[in-house]
Image: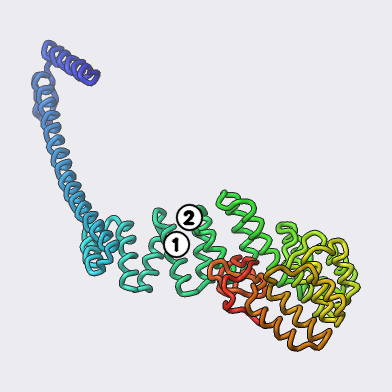
Amino acid sequence: MLRLAFFIIQFLLILALVALLVSNSFIISFDIGDYKYSFSSNIFFGSLLGLLFILYIIQYLYFKAKFSFHKYILINKFKKLEKGYSFFVDAMIAIANKDNKKAISSNKKMLTYLKDDPTLSLLLQAEVLKIEKKFDQLSTIYEEMIKRKNTETLGYRGLMEQNLNQQDFHHAFIYGEKLFFLNPKIEKLYDTLIYVIAKTKNWNQLLLITEKAFTHKIIEKDIANENKSIAYYEIAKIKMMSDAKESMKLIHKALSLKKNFAPYIKLYLEILFSLNQVAQIKKLLKKYWLESPSSILRNVIADLLVVNNLDDLELIKSIVNKNINHDESKKLLVFFAIRLNNWELARSSIKGLFDTKPSRELCLFMADIEVGEFGDIQKSDAWKLRAKNSDLENLWICKITNQPQNEWESLSRSGYFNSLEWKQPKMLNQFIETT
C-alpha cells in the first residue's frame, strides 16, 4: 500500500513538472560555427524524456534477460543436485544392503552431478573405498575431509580408525587427540583414547585427557580419579629406577585417589625397599593390614617379604596382631608358619578356617602340614586330591575375556585397559598362570 502511494506521488510530481514546462515553454538557442540553431524547450524536454524512456526499456529488457538466464542456470543446477542426491540415497541404501556393486555404480553417477558439493561426495567416496578396500585412496579422502570445517571431525575419526586397524597406535592417538579437542563428546571416543594411551604408555596424556573428559562431564568423578590414579601409578613405576623420591610422590598421589589398592601398596613398598627403608616398611605393613586385610594384600605382603628375606614370624605376628581373628590374618600366619617349619603354629592357625567345602589353598596348606609335621605322605596326597576338586582362590580376571592372571596390570594380558577384577575363576579347569 505504501509502495503504491509512493508511486502515485512520484507520478503526480513528474506530471506537474511536465505541465509546468509545457505551459512555460521558451526558445533554446546555440551557435555552432557560423550557424545559429533555435528550437522550443518543449522539443528539448520531450526528446530528453523519450531518450530516458528508451534507456529504461533497454535496461528493463537487459535485466529481464539476465534474470531469465540465471533462472535457467539455477533450474538446471537444481535438477543436477536432485539427481545427485537421488544417486547418493541409492548408494547409501546399497551400502546398507551390502550391495557393493550398486553402491560403486551409484557413487560414480553421483560424482557427475555433485561436483560443486564435495561434502556428500567425500562421505560416499569414503564408504565406497572402504568396500573396495582401497585404503591409500581412503586416507586421501579423509585428508580432504580434514580441510573442510563441516567434515573435519569425520576426517580425523576415519584416520584414527584406520591407524587403529593397522595397530599404528602412535598416529591413532595423534588423530584421536585432535578429534577429542574438536568434539570430546563423541560416543566412546574417550574410551578409545584410553585404550590407545595404554598401548602407547603415554601416561601424561592420560592425565590431561581424563581431566578434560571430567570437565566436559563425559565421565564421573570416581572414574576420573581411578584413571588418574593409574596414570600416577604407571609414571611412578617408570620413575622408580631413575628418581625414587619423585616416584614416591607419584605413588602417594595414586593412593590418595584409590586408597588401599593392593597393587599400589606393592609398588610403594618396593620403592621403600629400593631406598632400604625397612623400619618404614614394617610400620606401613601394620597400618595397611589393619585398615584393609584382604587376600590381595596378603599375597602382596607374602611375596615382598619372601623376596626381601624378611620372612620372620615375629614380624608376621606383629603385622596381624590387631586383627588376629580375621581369616586372612590366619592364612598369612599359616603360610609363613609352613614356610618356616613351625607346624604347631600352622596347625593352630588353620583351625576355624575349614567349612564343609574348603578352598584349594586350604587343602594344599593341610597337605604341606601333614607331610611336614608327620611325614604322612598318604594324608598329604589325600589333601592334594581334595584340592583338585575344591574351589580356586581369587585371581585377577579380565572382565572382557575372562582370562585370569596372577598380577594386576593397568593393561591386561588380553589387551584391555583397567579390565581386571579380583574374583574367583568360573571354571576349575580354566587356564591358570604359573609365572
Quarter of the image where the C terminus is located = bottom right
| Residue at image point 72% right, 61% down | 254
Disc 1 and disc 2 in contact, CB within 8 angstroms: yes
Image quadrant in which you'd find residue 123: bottom left
Dot 2 crowding, Cα within 10 Å, few <14, some 14–19, many 20+: few
Which residue in the protein does label 1 denote? Answer: 157
Residue 179 numbered tag: none
| Residue at image point 59% right, 58% down | 209
Q: Nearer the viewer, residue 22 or 264?
A: 264
Which residue in the protein does label 2 denote? Answer: 186
| Residue at image point 88% right, 77% down | 312
Determine whether 123 is above or below 30 in the image: below
Determine whether 140 is above or below 38 in the image: below
Decide if residue 247 is in sight here: no
- Label 1 – label 2 distance at C-alpha: 10 Å
Residue 289 position, x and y percent, is 81, 64
Q: Secondary structure at mark 2?
A: loop
Image quadrant in which you'd find residue 316: bottom right
The number of numbered badges drawn on the structure is 2
Q: In the image, 18: left or right of 265?
A: left
Residue 130 position, x and y percent, is 34, 69
Determine whether 142 is above or below 119 in the image: below
Image quadrant in which you'd find residue 310: bottom right
Amino acid type at image mark 2: Ile
Amino acid type at image mark 1: Arg
Residue 28 position, x and y percent, is 13, 20
Q: Report the colour scheme.
A: rainbow
| Residue at image point 67% right, 72% down | 393
Q: Secondary structure at mark 1?
A: helix
Q: Nearer the viewer, residue 185 or 154?
A: 185
